[in-house]
Image (tube, helix red, strand yellow):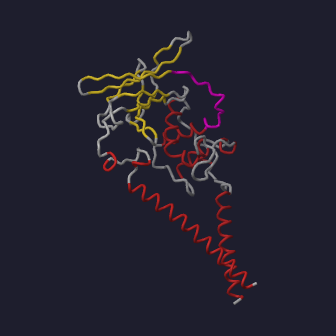
Amino acid sequence: MKNTHKQKYAQASLFILFLFTGFLAMAQDFPPWSVPDGEAARENPIAADKQSLEAGKALYDMQCKACHGETGKGDGLIKAANMVSQEFQAQSDGAIFYKLQQGRGQMPSFKALPEEQLWNVINYTHSLSVKREDIVVKEATLSLSFNEVGDKKELTAVVKSPDEDGQNQPVSGIRVNIGVERYFGVLPISGSPLTTNEKGEVKLIFPNHLIGDEIGEINIVATIDDMEYKPVQSTEQIIWGTANPNDYWSERRALWKNNDYIPLWLLTSFVGAALAIWGTIMYVALLVRKIKIEGDKAA
């Protein structure tokens, strides 16, 4: 009988030890990553100009930010290298390029991507170590105007920035994102960012199928996406949407709506997952309690 209790204690101890060592493994630093001398000596052929940094940021936001974090400190969903650290920044561009192509552990290989994109993202990772307060950014204004010609609805965004005399002048080459406000964020309608012309304008033919409120009113949101300028946002209300139909509750469920109108499959999945998690916690708690009771009896 005592041997049986000892076996249970041993199994419980091994289980706890397994969990503890698992957490330690997750928290430990990354082991050294050796790079061949020839690869480390490769030079970056792409100049770290505005175009390269913006292209690198776009790739970073898509492929790297989830793990390495918004500012590159490795504080994303999965523990990753701190790109702001001196150790990382001391590496040669060739060494980083080699690691991006090879991949290791949970970091995938990006060898399939064009080399130019990898060099661009390397340039951007170097910019992460620059203190934001040391970066001089410009001021800008963003305005929206609307025009209807027949069945077409045209939206125009204008970007201006003050010159040396303080007069607002149109700015070309500025990327602008345009979308419609939803419960869970902004639904893009411009696809990729649009770029202002010599008049500082971007024009967009507005889609006719977007659902608004009960009278078709929607909030249009435009933002500047440019590293040289401070973040700017402009929001305007206009009745360019489709009015909510009477069957909104039963047939118009969608991901971007509030909690009362989310899809049934999503609600069911969430509740099921939550119940499974709590059920597992309760089961483990009951096992621990049972082990304690058996231990007390053996004593």
Does residue 124 sit above or below 80 in this rendering? Answer: above
- Residue 295 in the image: above or below residue 110: below
Residue found 56% across the figure and 40% down from its top: 122
Going 44% across and 41% down the picture, which residue do you hit? 183
In this rendering, is residue 181 above or below 289? Answer: above
- Check if residue 57 falls in the magenta segment: no
- Locate residue 64, reporting x and y percent: 54, 46
Q: Position of residue 36 (x, y in %)?
A: 61, 51
Residue 178 occupies which quadrant of the picture? top left
Of the pair 174 and 182, the residue shown nearer to us: 182
Task: Pick the quarter of the image with the C terminus.
Answer: bottom right
* Residue at left offset 53%, top offset 36%: 45
Instruction: Identify the residue at the far right of this view.
Output: 299
Instruction: Say left or right for 177 vs 228.
Output: left
Judge from the rendering whether residue 5 lies leftward or rightward of residue 119; answer left or right.
Answer: right
Q: Is residue 169 above or below residue 76?
A: above
Number of disc labels? 0
Question: For this rendering, which residue is in front, 214 or 228?
Answer: 214
| Image quadrant containing the N terminus | bottom right
| Residue 182: percent from left, percent from top | 42, 39
State the residue in front, 9 or 81. Answer: 9
Which secondary structure dominates the residues rendered in magenta? loop
Q: Is residue 139 magenta?
A: yes
Q: Position of residue 248 (x, y in %)?
A: 32, 45
* Identity of the residue furthest to the bottom in this view: 1
Q: Magenta region: which residues?
A: 126-140
- Name which residue lies at 29% across and 23% down: 148
Q: Residue furthest left?
A: 150
